[in-house]
Amino acid sequence: MLLWSIARASALVAFAAYTGVVIWGMLVAGRAFRPAAPAVAFHRFLAMVGLVGVVTHVTAIMLDSYAKLSLPALFGIGAKPSVVFGAIALWLVVTLPLSFRLRKAKWISQKVWRGFHWFGYAAWATMLVHGVFSGTDTRSPYAVLLYSAAGGLVAGAGAWRYLTPGKSVQRRPQTVSR
């Protein structure tokens, strides 16, 4: 019973943290914070909290004899569709921080990294689907409130980010060297 409680609690913590990551990322990208460095650091902190929550959730589920989750299910093999969504979210939240490390090592370009970073939205959405269809607490008032509030906040941040004029990234004009 303890493992099951840990799995449930860590899943909700991870989802809340990644909701914060998505919202904060949109605010940083939309230039709501200047200088951006402290805001980006908080974005990364939330992502690490979320990653710890996901790892705790998966570990507790794997160790819980009642859940009966097999190792192949972590790769989407032989699992219910709702668990496959969880597996997709797992691998996305593992690879997104790795892409940042690849960018810092200059193994991938800024453009490739930014393109891959869009998968953060997919990670959040697959977490939401996984939680709604696999979560044992889905019908509880606090889970309904969490999922509804998260959806509303992400939608609101997205609307602000993409509908507010003047939030586009300014590029420096290229100079021609002679």
Image (cartoon, rainbow, N blue to C red):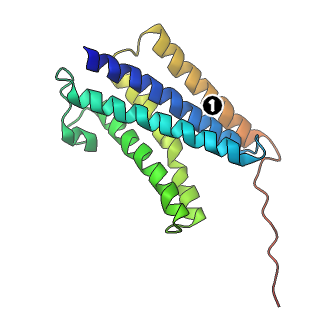
Q: Is residue 130 left or right of residue 172?
A: left
**Where residue 95 appears, x then y in whole percent?**
42, 51
Which element carries disc 1, helix, strand or loop? helix
Q: Quadrant of the C terminus?
A: bottom right
Q: Is residue 137 above or below residue 7?
A: above
Mark 1, residue position? 155
Q: Amino acid at mark 1?
A: Ala
Could you say which quadrant of the image residue 127 lies in? top left
Tell me if residue 124 can be seen. Answer: no
**Where residue 160 appears, x then y in whole percent?**
73, 36
Could you say which quadrant of the image residue 30 lies in? top right
Residue at figure coordinates x 78%, y 47% from the top left:
167
Could you say which quadrant of the image residue 23 lies in? top right
Comparing 173 with 5, the one in front is: 5
Q: Is residue 111 left or right of residue 147?
A: right
Q: Is residue 174 above or below residue 102?
A: below
**Where residue 133 appears, x then y in whole percent?**
36, 24
Residue closest to the far top: 141
Residue at figure coordinates x 25%, y 32% from the top left:
80
**Where residue 55 appears, x then y in whole percent?**
36, 36
Comparing 113 with 156, the one in front is: 113
